[in-house]
């Protein structure tokens, strides 16, 4: 690997997973310190009140800058479904679903799709594809005859 000084050096590059494994399987003092730190992070004990307050301020700033997202979030917390939210916001139910997923990734809501509706949607898509394939087959047969 070439360095900024123009010289070549033999270098090892480790992935994140490899670094973690080295930290857990090594017996050095640094590895022991790493394991203590990782245990605190994994247990959630590093999340202080200051971190929580900062997160709340960031979320509030995001929602104040994105009033459309704040409105969508408010309607979702009221218990409205995606179609109802879509009618009130002028969005399709699919766009509402996509935005709710993004808001959930940001930690602003606890959105989980209804498994029954998701399964019905998959079945509907499969039926639509079968119908399209059947229609295409009919059309190709009509052209041959």
Image: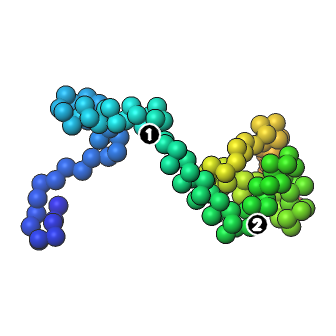
Q: Is residue 42 left or right of residue 62?
A: left
Question: On the rendered image, what quadrant is the C terminus found in?
Answer: bottom right
Q: Is residue 29 above or below residue 117?
A: above
Among the 4 quarters of the image, the one containing residue 96: bottom right
Q: State the residue position of label 2.
A: 68
Q: Residue at x 12, y 54 (%)?
A: 10
User: Residue 121's x, y, as percent?
Assistant: 81, 45
Q: Residues within 10 Å of mark 1 (few under 14, many from 20)?
A: few
How far from the left and from the top, in percent, is residue 122?
Answer: 77, 43
Numbered label attached to residue 62:
none
- Relative to 4, is 56 on the left or the right? right
Q: Residue at x 65, y 59 (%)?
A: 60
Where's residue 2, x and y in %?
16, 65
Image-based side of 114 in relation to 37, left or right: right
- Which element carries disc 2, helix, strand or loop? helix
Query: x, y (%) of residue 20?
Result: 32, 38
Q: Is residue 41 above or below residue 59?
A: above
Q: Nearer the viewer, mark 1 or mark 2?
A: 1
Q: Residue at x 19, y 49 (%)?
A: 12
Q: CA distance from mark 1 to mark 2?
A: 33 Å
Q: Secondary structure at mark 1?
A: loop
Q: In the drawing, does residue 75 fall left or right of residue 39?
A: right
């Amino acid at each position: 690997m070439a360095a900024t000084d123009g010289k070549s050096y033999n270098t090892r590059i480790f992935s994140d997973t490899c670094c973690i494994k080295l930290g857990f399987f090594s017996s050095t003092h640094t590895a022991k310190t790493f394991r203590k730190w990782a245990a605190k992070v994994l247990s959630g004990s590093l999340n202080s009140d200051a971190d929580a307050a900062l997160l709340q301020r960031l979320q509030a700033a995001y929602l104040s800058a994105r009033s459309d997202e704040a409105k969508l979030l408010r309607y979702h917390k009221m218990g409205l479904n995606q179609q109802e939210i879509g009618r009130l916001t002028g969005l399709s139910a699919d766009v509402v679903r996509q935005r709710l997923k993004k808001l959930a990734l940001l930690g602003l809501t606890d959105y989980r799709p209804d498994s029954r509706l998701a399964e019905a949607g998959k079945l509907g898509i499969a039926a639509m594809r079968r119908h399209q394939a059947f229609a295409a087959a009919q059309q190709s047969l009509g052209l041959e005859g």
